[in-house]
Structures are given as C-alpha cells and as structure tokens.
Amino acid sequence: MTAQTKADHEADTLLFSLRQLAAITGIHRDTIKQRLGGISPRSARNGHAVYFLGDVGSALFADAGGTPTAPPNKLGPQAANHMASAQLKKIKIDQQLGHLLPVDKVRLEWGRVLKAVMATLETLPDVLERDAGLTPEQIIAVVTTLDDVRERLYQEMIDPPEVAHG
C-alpha cells in the first residue's frame, strides 16, 4: 500500500454517518443533525451523508460537560444553582486529587523555599571567598549583585504581576 492510499484509507476510517456518530457519542441523531447544521458532509456512503470526525468533533461536543450556552449572569436561578454546584464539586475533586491546594499551604511552602534560597544567598559570598579564592573586590561585586537579586525577589513578592484567570 502506498503512502497516499494508506492516508486515504485512514481518512476514510474517520468518516461517519449520523447514525454512527449517534452510536459512538450517545447523542441522539436529531441533536447531532442540529449541531452539524453548518457543516457539509465529506461524501456519501450507501446514499447517506458521511462526515469527517475532524470537521464535526467540536460541533458535537460544544455543549458537552454541562457548559452553559448563556453567560452565567444570564442563567435562570435553577441553572445558575446547578452551575455553582458543579463548580464546587469540581473544586472538591481537584482538592482530593491534589491539583488544587489551600492558599495557606501554598504560602507556607513558598515561605519555606524562599527562606532556604535567602539563606543560601546570605552565605554565598563567604563560600566563594573561602572555596573559590575570590578577592575582596570580587566579593563586593557578588554582594552587590546578590543585594539586587534579593530586592527583585522582594519587589515581586509585594507587587506580583497580574495573573489571568481562566
């Protein structure tokens, strides 16, 4: 089989009719037909339109996972309650899996790490003087540089850059 015919064969295996898409996804055929309204079929098999999975994937699952189609502030009370409940459940699951940590724990860990970094920076000039044989002028340059580094770290801590939430 040539490379081109192999590619054609692989592409053909990703062509599905509405019935096949419904069977694979568990979404009703009429719902699939509605979601694929603006997508043209790639070809036909046995008189039925077939769609390339790459063309229809995002349209099929646009509303999957309970994502509301309206902005949260436009939802009715029941839908807003369901959405809030789902978000809280997701947060709890993320916490249980260790993907989301309490702020206090993060602060403690960052404090521990920064304390170790600062202790290392404090002793670095002495270590360089003793082990690397740096001259007093070189040590002064190292101390000046380390002071600048400490100041930048401090400034980042008190005035962190804005973080996009998404």
Image (cartoon, helix red, strand yellow):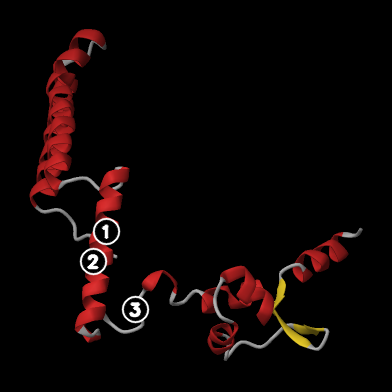
Q: Residues within 10 Å of mark 3 (few under 14, many from 20)?
A: some
| Residue to which mark 3 is pinned | 68
Q: Position of residue 108 (x, y in %)?
A: 12, 36
Specify the quadrant of the image occupied by residue 57: bottom right
Element under disc 2? helix
Cα separation, mark 1 vs mark 2, equals 6 Å
Q: Give amino acid for label 2.
A: Ser
Q: Is residue 151 left or right of residue 2?
A: left
Element under disc 3? loop
Residue sitting at 11 percent across and 43 percent down?
Answer: 104
Q: Is residue 145 visible?
A: no
Element under disc 1? helix
Residue sitting at 62 percent across and 77 percent down?
Answer: 55
Disc 1 + disc 2, Cβ < 8 Å: yes
Depicted 25 relative to depicted 117: above or below? below
Q: Position of residue 163 (x, y in %)?
A: 22, 60
| Residue to which mark 2 is pinned | 85
| Residue to which mark 1 is pinned | 89
Q: Position of residue 146 (x, y in %)?
A: 15, 31
Q: Nearer the viewer, residue 1 or 136?
A: 1
**Viewer-nearest of discs 3 and 1:** 1
Q: Nearer the viewer, residue 49 or 101?
A: 49
In primary-sequence order, the first of circles 2 and 3 is 3
Q: Position of residue 158 (x, y in %)?
A: 7, 49
Q: How many marks?
A: 3
**Viewer-nearest of discs 2 and 3:** 2
Cα separation, mark 3 vs mark 1, equals 16 Å
